[in-house]
Amino acid sequence: MEPEKTRYSDEELEEFKTLILEKLDKATAEYERYRRVLMNREGNDTADTSPTFKVLEEGASTLSKEEAGRLAMRQAQFITHLQNALRRIENKTYGIDRITGKLIPKERLRAVPHATLSVDSKK
């Protein structure tokens, strides 16, 4: 019987790094869009009604500055989590559950690449 893996291989870490970098690019672009809405202090120019800022639901309304501010804060927090995940990849501690010390399943990391807990530990 093989001993239980205690960390992901360099190849596996590289796969996760690629995934995280893609998510980081998208998150940064979204964050910048929200920032542009917030920087528009006049209130009623085209940035307020741009389809880019429509909420992606039926009957969508444009984002208010308050909503854009809240979304920008969430994006900034998400970006920080992704950057921290990249640091864990660099120091080879990525994918290790911070409570149990065991590897977080790949499926969870693909869904939530900045996870530091397995589903069981999170409960």
Image (cartoon, helix red, strand yellow):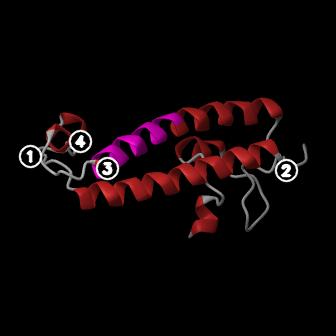
Residue at 90% of width from left, 47% of height from top? 3
Pointer 4: what residue? 53
Secondary-structure class at tag 2 = loop
Q: Is residue 118 above or below residue 5?
A: below
Q: How many marks?
A: 4
Q: Look at label 2 and name its amino acid.
A: Thr
Q: Look at label 4 and name its amino acid.
A: Phe
Secondary-structure class at tag 1 = loop
Q: How far across and down, in percent of the image, does residue 25 sit? A: 51, 34
Q: Quadrant of the C terminus?
A: bottom right
Q: Which mark is residue 6?
A: 2
Which is closer to the viewer, label 2 or label 4? 4
Q: How far across and down, in percent of the image, does residue 53 sit? A: 23, 42
Pointer 3: what residue? 39
Q: Look at label 1 and name its amino acid.
A: Gly
Query: What residue span does the magenta drawing correspond to?
Result: 25-38
Pointer 1: what residue? 59
